[in-house]
Image (cartoon, grey):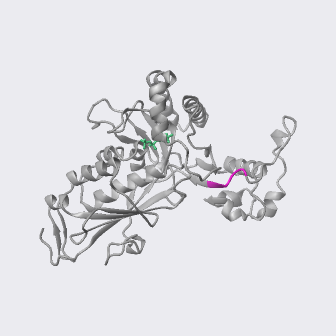
Amino acid sequence: MASGTESWILMATGRTPTNIAVIKYWGKRDEALILPVNDSISVTLDPDHLSATTTVAVSPTFDRDRMWLNGKEIPLSGDRFQSCLREIRKLADDVEDEKKGIRIQKDDWQKLHVHIASYNNFPTAAGLASSAAGLACFVFTLAKLMNVKEDCGKLSSIARQGSGSACRSMYGGFVKWTMGKDASGSDSIAVQLASESHWNDLVIIIAVVSSKQKETSSTTGMRDSVETSPLLQHRAQTVVPGRILQMEEAIRNRDFASFARLTCADSNQFHAAAYTFDAGPNSVLIAPNRKSAGLLLQRLLFCFPPPAHNELTSYVIGDKSILHEAGLQSMKDVEALPPPPESKDKYPSQKFPGVVSYFICTRLGSGPRVLTDESLALLSPTTGLPK
Ligand code: DP6
């Protein structure tokens, strides 16, 4: 390994969005390679509100690979991290940084160790696909550091081996994970159906009702479903293929009625399939435009007001402009909200304060990107340890 001195540190920082599936991935046909039993489609959420940021550093002085998540060191020994590291190292290329006098040759990457620091700008345990953003960022940022030339499709197949849904975070907008046929998993990759600008008036409101870690992980829940549920096989073989085509058409035509019907139908079936398994309680609502989102927020805040003494600004986070457009500037405005007009005769307009922990208002977002501003790096450029 040629280098000016042996104490250099080279770093890269990336930011990768999270995604929410509208046609769900549930069930694997290969547990080690993480190959799914059906195609799935997701929307990528705005990284300003929900994303992972990761800094990776390499130095000849590092004696082992290490990782910190939200400031706490975590083991990298798990199979999934190891698969991603191994696959990225295989694709690593020569890197030259003349200013720092660093030259790393392709084969050097097998011997060099990395430090990785990752941070989520949303609660990790809130069941909001933190693993998708995190693993996608892990792969994307390592690929940048190691000068991997392969496209996002190839990177998505590596992120998939970290966590299935992570492959869809390699693109912005609307993304399909094609299940593929090959036993090696080479064709089980994510593709972008449309960018975020194709249908940018959609508003997404996430009601976070619990930030507790799920009792049953997705991995275990889907394993149990594959082993015990005939409904899951029917879903994968018969229902999803048609639904995927219809969803692609709905997205292409910006047909909200079909998009909403398919999204709800798939969510209902997913919960029927996972009937006895807790799969995370937070609900994701999609409104066709800002005006409907404002009306929806008024109703949500009427039924699920914040607990006493809670500030509106910490109860509705993310894109707060929708709140303001809906005439909700303060708690006083929330308290003055009239009951939803459509509920008057049908059922009493009950209030459930404190049931929802908080709401996140967001929209469709863009794919991964490199952060060149060094002040955003999570590792120190001189020690390679968390700042
Ligand atoms: C319900 O991708 O977290 O969010 O591949 O075992 O890591 P592993 O599972 P994960 O499962 C996500 C399941 C889901 C549906 C979806 O995102 O499509």
Image coordinates of residue 13 in percent, x first then y, are 36, 65
Res 183 → quadrant = top left
Image coordinates of residue 189 in percent, x first then y, are 34, 40
* Residue drawn at 58 percent across, 47 percent down: 202
Q: Is residue 16 above or below residue 254?
A: below
Q: Is residue 335 above or below residue 242?
A: below
* Residue drawn at 58 percent across, 54 percent down: 362
Image coordinates of residue 120 in percent, x first then y, are 48, 60
Q: Give the range drawn in magenta.
A: 355-360
* Residue drawn at 39 percent across, 52 percent down: 135
The quarter of the image holding the C terminus is: bottom left
Relative placement, left or right, of 62 versus 20 is: left
The quarter of the image holding the N terminus is: bottom left
Q: How many labels does the image show?
A: 0
Q: Nearer the viewer, residue 47 or 76?
A: 76
- Does the magenta segment cover residue 345? no
- Does the magenta segment cover residue 357? yes
Res 163 → quadrant = top left
* Residue drawn at 48 percent across, 41 percent down: 218
Relative placement, left or right, of 113 versus 54 is: left
Relative placement, left or right, of 185 versus 40 is: left
Residue 26, visible in the rendered structure: no
Image coordinates of residue 234 in percent, x first then y, are 48, 21
Q: Is residue 36 above or below residue 108?
A: above
